[in-house]
Every structure is written in C-alpha cells, then in structure tokens.
Amino acid sequence: IRTPPVADAAAPSAEPARSATNGIGAPRGASDRRDAAPTAAATLQASLALGFGYPPTHPAPIYNSTFFRDPAEPMKSGDLVILHMGGDEMDFLYLRPENFACWDSKLGRFDHRDFVGKPFGSRIYARTVKTGRRGKPGKEPGYIYALLPTPELWSECLPHR
C-alpha cells in the first residue's frame, strides 16, 4: 500500500516533503525504489489483517481426503464418490450439492443432494426415468451405487487410453 507524501504545513515549499517510509511501508533506506515489492512477511501480515489466508495457529483445510476417512461416516459436500453403474462401468464425481449440481447418464439424472447424508455403498435412484429400448421412456428410474474410493477403484474409473 502506497502512502502519499505528507506536506509540512509550517513550511510550504515547491517540493512536497517525503514521508518516513519509502511508500510501501518499509523504512526509507531499506529500498529507495518507490515501486519496490513488499517483503513476504509484510505481505503475509497484510493478507491476515484483511482476512485472507490462514493464520499460523490454524492449519489449512485438507481437501480430497476421502481416501483416508472413516467409511462409516455419511457422504458430505466435497467428497469424492465412485459411481458404479453395473458391470464394469464406473465413473467418479465430487459432490457439490450447494450448486444444485446434477450428474447425467444413460441411467437418468442424479442430483448431488440425493447423495449427501447417505452411507457409502448406498443405492441412489435417479430423479428421471431412464430411456428404455429404442428411445422409448422406461418404466422405472435407474440407479447407481455410490462407493467409497479406494486406490483400486480410483485407478479403475480413471479414463485410460
């Protein structure tokens, strides 16, 4: 943050008086360049004062920790879920119920809000009826299994060449 030079009211002059800092908060003499970048410590202090970043006493949140979680816990927002559609068909998704996200497939439309709160391994039913033979509407909604990711399942559902 640059501070404008402060003029001395007692002695008017043609040139305004310079402040005790070099314009970026560092004492004059540390760097006489007025466009010099602030130090990393000053940037960290400024960002914490403005509410950005994480203070040293609070650890940063860990995302994508689904591989190392208790399998008995229900699914929640941000979780990685392996979708088993039958046979050897698998896909994955990150749950984002706050965005009203949906996952579409040939089995129907699955709303992310239907996953939240259910245990891993649950059968999740589609909100729409799947397409039957030759494009005719089916009689029952499709379903998928929402599985807890393991390294084996994750490598199975990743797209390979």
Image: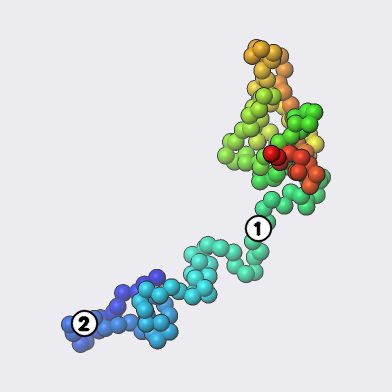
Picture disc at residue 25 = none
Residue 94, image x, y percentages: 66, 42
Callout 2 secondary element: loop
Residue drawn at x 72%, y 23% as measured from the top left: 142
Looking at the image, which is closer to me, 39 or 160?
160
Mark yes or no: residue 15 visible.
yes
Picture disc at residue 61 = 1
| Residue 95 located left or right of residue 35 | right
Residue drawn at x 21%, y 87% as measured from the top left: 10
**Image position of 125 with respect to 92: above or below:** above
Quadrant location of the C terminus in the rendered image: top right
Residue drawn at x 56%, y 63% as measured from the top left: 53
Mark yes or no: residue 27 visible.
no
Residue 88, image x, y percentages: 78, 31
Callout 1 secondary element: loop
Residues packed near mark 2 inside 10 Å, few (<14), some (14 to 19) or many (20 plus): few
**Amino acid type, label 1:** Pro
Spatial CA span between label 1 and label 2: 51 Å
**Amino acid type, label 2:** Glu
Q: Which residue is mark 2?
A: 15
Looking at the image, which is closer to me, 16 or 9?
16
Quarter holding residue 59: bottom right
Residue 68, image x, y percentages: 78, 52
